[in-house]
Image (spheres, rainbow, N blue to C red):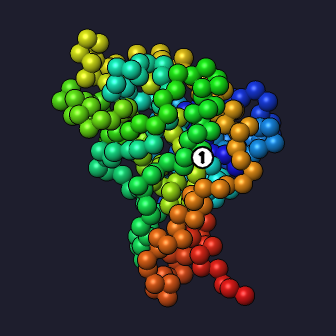
Amino acid sequence: MLGVIGGSGLYELPGIEDLREERVSTPFGDPSDAIVLGRLGGVDAAFLPRHGRGHTISPTEINFRANVYALKQLGVQFLVSVGAVGSLRAELPPGSVVVPDQFIDRTVARPSTFFGDGIVAHVSLADPVCQVLAGIVADAAGACGGRVRRGGTYICMEGPQFSTRAESHLYRSWQADVIGMTNWQEAKLAREAELCFASLAMVTDFDCWKEDEEAVEVEDILRVLHANADLARRSVAAVVRALPAQRTCGCGSALANAIITAPDKISAEARRRLAPIVGKYFEEKP
């Protein structure tokens, strides 16, 4: 199953069938909205509007843990995060698409791990994106007419305010390429949930470093965002058609050596809470 986190309407794809909604409860609270389920080309897909329908949830208020947990619980194995970003590079103008392979975290107020409360795990995030899925996403966006940059660094800022000029110049000095407010928590939690993860970052504006441009305004972002929406939908449909029948990457075993709490010290409550994520590691052996 493919999971897609993004804006409302990403599921409005030609040929999608059996559309239905499902509300999922999780130990971490409720996801941003009901999850839309359907089938496209014989593949199951699940769509979740990150900010809720009508965009009622700010980046800091998103329940990232509930969103990713709910998708895992429904059977998602591949997760694509679609979102708007600002450009930190002249060669990435509005309308460009970036499939990043690195992130820098500038958030300060967001729970972004399923672990704690009696069970500790440390997953590797050296390479936080599934290279197999990222390649599929980049190929799909390119085939649909997108101007695609493969690889790059995504700065994830807290928001909801945009950057100062000083911050924007600092991020450029770090060799970052785009800036957004949401994808890093999704990437971290996807790794813990052993999902293949890739980001489809849609450039809507130049961040405020580019002083020959007007400082970013919401109206400008929305105008480009709406123009990008059709490309995002067509790219998602192309990703579905290209998914492998079996996963060959290491994402599905990211926790194999990451849980360091002694099994006899993990409470029954903790095992129940994280059953969809860690259950296979504590199954009784025959």
Relative to 283, 83 lies left or right:
left
The location of residue 22, given as percent across then percent down, is: 68, 48
The relative height of residue 241 versus residue 185 in the rendered view (above or below) is: above
Residue at 43% of width from left, 49% of height from top?
A: 185
Q: Quadrant of the C terminus?
A: bottom right
- In the image shown, does 86 or 222 lie closer to the viewer? 86
Secondary element at image label 1 = helix
Residue 79 in sight: no
Task: Identify residue for label 1.
Answer: 132
Q: What residue lies at 27% left-to-right and 31% top-to-bottom? A: 172
Spot occupied by residue 241 in the image (x, y as percentages of width and height): 74, 37
Instruction: Pick out the residue farthest to the left.
Output: 166
Q: Nearer the viewer, residue 156 or 137?
A: 137
Q: Residues within 10 Å of mark 1 (few under 14, many from 20)?
A: some
Residue occupying the point 38% across, 44% down: 103
The number of numbered badges drawn on the structure is 1
Kind of residue indicated by mark 1:
Val
Residue 208 occupies quadrant: top left
Q: Nearer the viewer, residue 132 or 26?
A: 132
User: On screen, 244 above or below 283?
Assistant: above
Which residue is at 58% across, 51% downward?
A: 196
Query: What is the x, y in percent for residue 114?
Result: 46, 63
Q: Quadrant of residue 124?
A: bottom left
Q: Is residue 172 above or below residue 110?
A: above
> Can you see residue 106?
yes
Displayed quadrant of residue 165: top left
